[in-house]
Image (cartoon, rainbow, N blue to C red):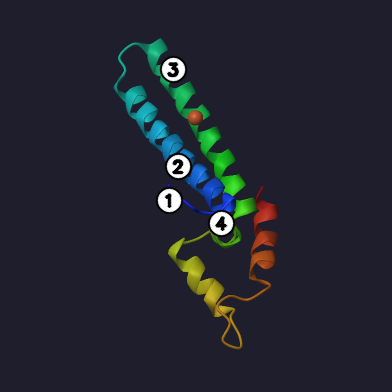
């Protein structure tokens, strides 16, 4: 971490570093679960992998709530359907008046999202 950064930036750094660690743990446990010969050990590895996924999801949610730009991207892309690469074009297609993103896009996408849960 850089010295002299704000408390807000430091918190984001903690969150991002933690997310990296949680995702690495997911990957490690996933590989160990696949490689483990003993069925009980394999089961434990899968259990631990899934717990690391929970930890990662908690941090993603904290980032969504506390880093508005990242949160906006999360809201744009998560729980959409169809081609992921097409989401940006879909969002940009709704732009009018030279704005990067329309103000109603997130809420209109969220309406689709909500009905799928
Ligand atoms: Fe964890």
Q: Is mark 2 within 8 Å of ligand 1?
A: no
Inter-mark Cα distance, 1 to 4: 26 Å
Q: Nearer the viewer, mark 2 or mark 1?
A: 1
Measuring 29% from the left and 22% from the top, which residue is drawn there?
A: 35
Kindly identify which residue carries mark 1.
2
Inter-mark Cα distance, 2 to 1: 13 Å
Mark 1 Cα within 10 Å, few/some/many (few <14, many 20+)? few
Measuring 56% from the left and 42% from the top, which residue is drawn there?
A: 59
Inter-mark Cα distance, 4 to 3: 31 Å
Counting residues from the N terminus, which is met first, the one under dot 2 or under dot 1?
Answer: 1
Counting residues from the N terminus, which is met first, the one under dot 2 or under dot 3?
Answer: 2
Quadrant position of residue 97: bottom right
Mark 2 Cα within 10 Å, few/some/many (few <14, many 20+)? few
Q: Nearer the viewer, mark 4 or mark 2?
A: 2
Kindly identify which residue carries mark 3.
43
Under tag 4, what secondary structure? helix
């Amino acid at each position: 971490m850089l010295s002299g950064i704000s408390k807000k930036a430091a918190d984001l750094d903690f969150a991002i570093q933690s997310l990296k660690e949680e995702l690495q743990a997911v990957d490690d446990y996933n590989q160990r679960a696949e490689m483990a010969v003993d069925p009980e050990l394999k089961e434990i590895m899968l259990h631990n992998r899934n717990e690391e996924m929970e930890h990662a999801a908690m941090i993603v949610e904290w980032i969504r709530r506390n880093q508005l730009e990242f949160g906006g991207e999360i809201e744009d892309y998560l729980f959409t359907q169809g081609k992921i690469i097409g989401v940006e074009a879909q969002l940009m297609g709704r732009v009018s008046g030279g704005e990067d993103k329309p103000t109603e896009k997130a809420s209109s996408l969220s309406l689709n999202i909500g009905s799928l849960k």
